[in-house]
Image (cartoon, rainbow, N blue to C red):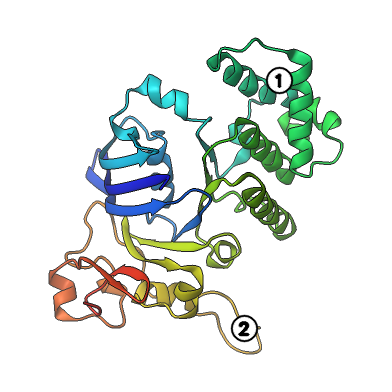
């Protein structure tokens, strides 16, 4: 097992009170496995991703454990985490342009990462060899004319090219775990498909584990082997992709799958989930989904369900167990 998360909690201290963004979340990730975290905006997906590499803002506090290869990242000192961040764990952010320095050429930024890696390994910096390695890295992400791209600044590249540069940076560092936080949300549909295809190809080629964060279940279906469905900071359902999409169990997962556009305008209206996600400063008692659930029971309003395992799925719902 590469990553083992137990009882993860993330709270934010705000002027309005304590905001519970992630509550008692458990999951694991094996080497070479691809897992997608899906859910509506505001459910805690990005907070979860940032907490794994300890990139949360100063007003955040965490609890539980995040064990990577036998080491608990939440208990390590910041200087120790810096040695892991970017090398063993690499994160692709939602807006790739913010990941690059706007006043440095692509070549400088990619070579900096390799130079740092070489220094940590006690090796001397060879500029020509590093330059060639970077060119090969850009070629591996199917970037046309990599040497031309190397001499450009980030603002001179398209969204798809910037994302490929960031993915190339990740591959040059050869991480064990790649965390992709909605890497296609800022791209058009054509470029989305290219980036998804690229991630799938490189995952097989390099054997990296991938944690793919998205609100789009259709996109996640093409990337992941397993789904983690989040709602209001909690894990609602997890299981193999085919089972979660083909036969969802939790009412929230059912609603998400039904909201995927499958009809034309002439065939009917789009299906939407009624209501809105809860205010995390004052979440509802009991099950957090009960105000929007079509199968709500009295116990749902009073008690928050624990985890139940059935049909290769783990879920939190009073309808099961």
Which of the pair 293/85 is nearer the observer?
A: 85
Q: Which mark is residue 296?
A: none
Where does residue 100 sit, x and y in percent of width and height? 63, 30
Q: Which residue is mark 2?
A: 263
Of mark 2 and mark 1, the one earlier in the sequence is 1
Picture residue at 67% right of the left edge, 42% below the top: 163
Callout 2: SS = loop
Where does residue 52 sit, x and y in percent of width and height? 39, 40
The local crowd at label 1, few if under 14, some if 14 to 19, many if 20 or more residues have their Cα within 10 Å, is: some
Which of the pair 314/230 is nearer the observer?
A: 314
* CA–CA distance in space, label 2 to label 1: 48 Å
Picture residue at 24% right of the left edge, 38% below the top: 15
Q: Is residue 199 above or below residue 291?
A: above
- For the image, the number of numbered tags is 2
Which of the pair 12/50 is nearer the observer?
A: 50
Q: Nearer the viewer, mark 2 or mark 1?
A: 1
Q: For residue 153, what is the image quadrant? A: top right
Where does residue 38 sit, x and y in percent of width and height? 46, 60
Q: For residue 149, what is the image quadrant? A: top right
- Whether residue 82 appears in this view of the structure is yes
Q: Is residue 230 above or below residue 128?
A: below
- Whether residue 103 appears in this view of the structure is no
């Amino acid at each position: 097992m590469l990553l083992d998360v137990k009882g993860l909690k993330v709270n934010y201290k705000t002027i309005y009170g304590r905001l519970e963004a992630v509550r008692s979340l458990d999951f694991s990730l094996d080497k070479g496995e691809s897992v997608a975290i899906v859910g509506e905006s505001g459910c805690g997906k990005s907070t979860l991703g940032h907490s794994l590499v300890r990139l949360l803002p100063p007003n955040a506090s965490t609890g539980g454990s995040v064990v990577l290869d036998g080491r608990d990242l939440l208990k390590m000192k910041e200087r120790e985490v810096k040695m892991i961040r970017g090398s063993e764990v690499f994160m692709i952010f939602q807006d790739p342009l913010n990941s690059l320095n706007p006043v440095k050429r692509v070549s400088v930024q990619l070579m900096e990462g390799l130079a740092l890696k070489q220094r940590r390994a006690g090796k001397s910096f060879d500029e020509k060899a590093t330059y060639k390695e970077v060119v090969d890295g850009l070629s591996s992400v199917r970037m046309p004319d990599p040497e031309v791209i190397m001499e450009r600044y980030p603002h001179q590249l398209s969204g798809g090219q910037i994302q490929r540069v960031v993915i190339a940076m990740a591959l040059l560092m050869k991480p064990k775990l790649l965390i992709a936080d909605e890497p296609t949300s800022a791209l058009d549909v054509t470029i989305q498909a290219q980036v998804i295809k690229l991630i799938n190809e490189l995952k097989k080629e390099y054997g990296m584990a991938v944690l793919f964060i998205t609100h789009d279940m259709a996109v996640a279906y093409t990337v992941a082997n397993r789904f983690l469905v989040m709602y209001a900071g909690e894990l609602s359902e997890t299981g193999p992709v085919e089972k979660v999409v083909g036969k969802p169990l939790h009412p929230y997962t059912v609603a998400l799958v039904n909201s995927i556009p499958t009809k034309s305008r002439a065939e009917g209206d789009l299906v939407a989930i009624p209501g809105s996600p809860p205010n995390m400063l004052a979440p509802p008692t009991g099950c957090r989904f009960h105000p929007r659930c079509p199968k709500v029971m009295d116990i749902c309003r009073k008690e928050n369900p624990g985890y139940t395992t059935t049909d290769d799925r783990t879920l939190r719902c009073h309808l099961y167990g």
